[in-house]
Every structure is written in C-alpha cells, then in structure tokens.
Amino acid sequence: VQLQASGGGLVQAGGSLRLSCAASGRIIICSYVMAWFRQAPGKEREFVAYITRNTKYADSVLGRFTISRDNAKNTVYLQMNSLKPEDTAVYYCAASPIRSILFVPSSSRYDYEYWGQGTQVTVSS
C-alpha cells in the first residue's frame, strides 16, 4: 500500500488549499478508513479528519475543512478553507483497513497502519 500526498504550499491567512492523497497498491479506499493528520514543528501529530461512510473532524478545523473521496480515482481530498497561521504543519494522509462490521473508526494516529510521506502547508499572517 502506498499513499502519495500532494497539494501543499504557501498561502495567506484566509486562503484555501486542496490536498490530495492518491492510494495505490493493494488498497481500495472504500474498504479503509482514510484520514488526515498534521504535525507542526515541536508538536505531536494530531488528528484532522477521517472519512468512512461518515466523516469526523477535529474541533479546530470543523466548518473550515472538508474531507472527501473519489472511489474511482482511489483518492482522498482535504479541502481547506479560511486557513489560519495555526494550520501551518506537515499534513499526512493515513489509512486503516475496515476489518469487520463492528469496526469503529479512530482519531488516534496509533490506529493507522499506512502513511503517506506528508505535504507541507504554510499559512502566512
């Protein structure tokens, strides 16, 4: 399984970016929980959003970020609007297989098996 994140860059506060995470290898994203995490310098990696049949967001991004997926392209997106300087971080996509109908999606980074390489997002004030 390979996850390739892209779309990061430098943007002014209030601007928008769309991140993409292309999955390849033995993965069909509709059978996985797909998530975005981020890590700012000197801080731990933190949950941003995940998508299964439903979506969940961190409180800090709720109402500004939208996670979505295109099953035909095996790609997950993170649309980020109204960006703030505190959103500056390396953004990582992650995946965890849905192993049963009782599976409960997680916002813990420890519960994700596959990770992309990260893409830098920098928001200037």
Image: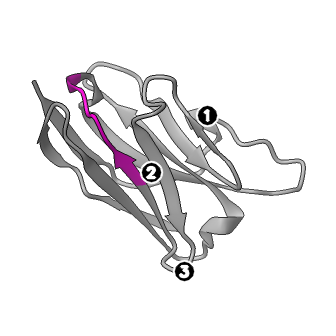
Q: Residue furthest top?
A: 42
Whether 92 is drawn above or below 70: the answer is above
Task: Find residue 51 and report its horizontal and vertical position in percent.
Answer: 60, 51
Mark 2: which secondary structure?
Answer: strand
Q: Which residue is mark 3?
A: 72
Task: Find residue 59 and report its horizontal and vertical position in percent.
Answer: 51, 23
Span shown in magenta: 78-85
**Three-letter code for the amino acid on which mark 3 is drawn:** Ala
**Three-letter code for the amino acid on which mark 1 is drawn:** Ser
Task: Find residue 30 and report its horizontal and vertical position in percent.
Answer: 66, 67
Q: In the rendered structure, does residue 81 fall within the stretch colored magenta?
A: yes
**Residue 61 occupies quadrant:** top left
In space, the residues marked 3 and 2 are separated at their CA atoms by 18 Å
Q: Which residue is mark 1?
A: 107
Residue appearing at x 24%, y 27% in the figure: 84
Q: Upstream in the sequence, badge 2 or badge 1?
A: 2
